[in-house]
Image: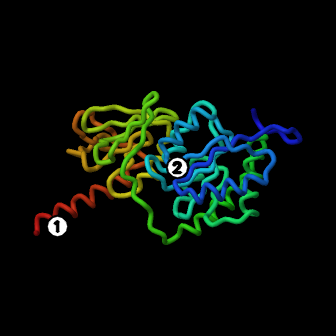
Amino acid sequence: MRWVPGCNAVIKVLIVDDEPLARKRVRDLLAAEADMQITGESGDGLDAYEKVQALKPDVLFLDIKMPGLSGLQLSRLLRTGKIPYIIFTTAYSEYAVEAFSVDAVDYLMKPFDRERFRQALTRARSRLAGSMPKAEEWQHIIQQLSGLTAGLPTQPLERLTVKDGTRLKFLNLPDITHMHSDGDYLHIHTVSGEHAMIRERMHDMERRLAGDRFVRISRSVLVNLEHVKEIRPAMHGDYKFILPGSEPLSSGKTYRETIRELMIRFRGDSRSTAHR
């Protein structure tokens, strides 16, 4: 049942945080909200995933750093069925922009007060009622949170979580050779020949994997440089990337400059090695 302004509909809430005191804080604040019903709590990401499937909450208060699955990993798995609106609750500001890439309703920085908590609830109620926030408001929020993240170290991603039916698979990044996009989905290929699929756009994945290991060579292909055996010139200034167990992967026009810079870097690395 969806919440509708002016009705007595109940909004079902699931609280997910590995700290009992943090869950109690959210629970106490919700006690003053007549339309909010707490249907459950969880202290780790894997358990939370199962409870979302079973309880089908309307709103999910979700911590970022947790055992099992992080809050961001969990949010990316919740892409089918009845999807709850997510309010992140965390002490870490550096994940703010990434949180909004998964369409979070709000991002509460711990410790938060009652007024800030109620602002998040107002946004959640607006979403449930079908009234989306203005684009300008969200742009302002993201800019503010971007300012909070400036100069802060980010946590490198170590593995991807992939839903396979009712199971969850964990793929270590070094084992991934490349990815290619198919609409809203990414096909992930590994050194073992295993193939997995995840619902995520290439642009978002590229941002998550920002660094020296993964490079986007076309609109639809992202490669792990550690598994590239050769880079061969092709027609019209493009290149072919040779990876084990895969057909040659073609670069695209838009990414020529990126690949040229990559080639220059490789030449520089080879010279440095030769002079050691």
**Residue 145 position (above or below residue 57):** below
Q: Is residue 136 visible?
A: no
Q: x, y (%) of residue 123?
A: 74, 51
Q: Identify the residue at horizontal 77%, vertical 52% (top origin).
A: 122
Work out whether mark 2 precedes mark 1 in sequence or the reverse, and give the earlier one. 2
Quarter-wise, where is residue 23 in the image?
bottom right
Q: x, y (%) of residue 235?
A: 31, 40
Closest to the observer, 170 or 179: 170
Q: In the drawing, what numbered circle is on residue 32? A: none
Q: Secondary structure at mark 1?
A: helix
Residue type, label 2: Gly
101 vs 6, left or right, is left
**Mark 2 and mark 1: Cα distance apart in space:** 49 Å
274 vs 222, left or right, is left
Closest to the observer, 96 or 206: 96
Q: Identify the residue at horizontal 81%, vertical 47% (top origin).
A: 34
Q: In the drawing, what numbered circle is on residue 272? A: 1
Q: Identify the residue at horizontal 48%, vertical 34% (top origin).
A: 185
Residue type, label 1: Ser
Residue under pointer 2: 43
Q: x, y (%) of residue 39?
A: 66, 40
Quarter-wise, where is residue 248 in the image?
top left
Mark in the foreground, 2 or 1: 2
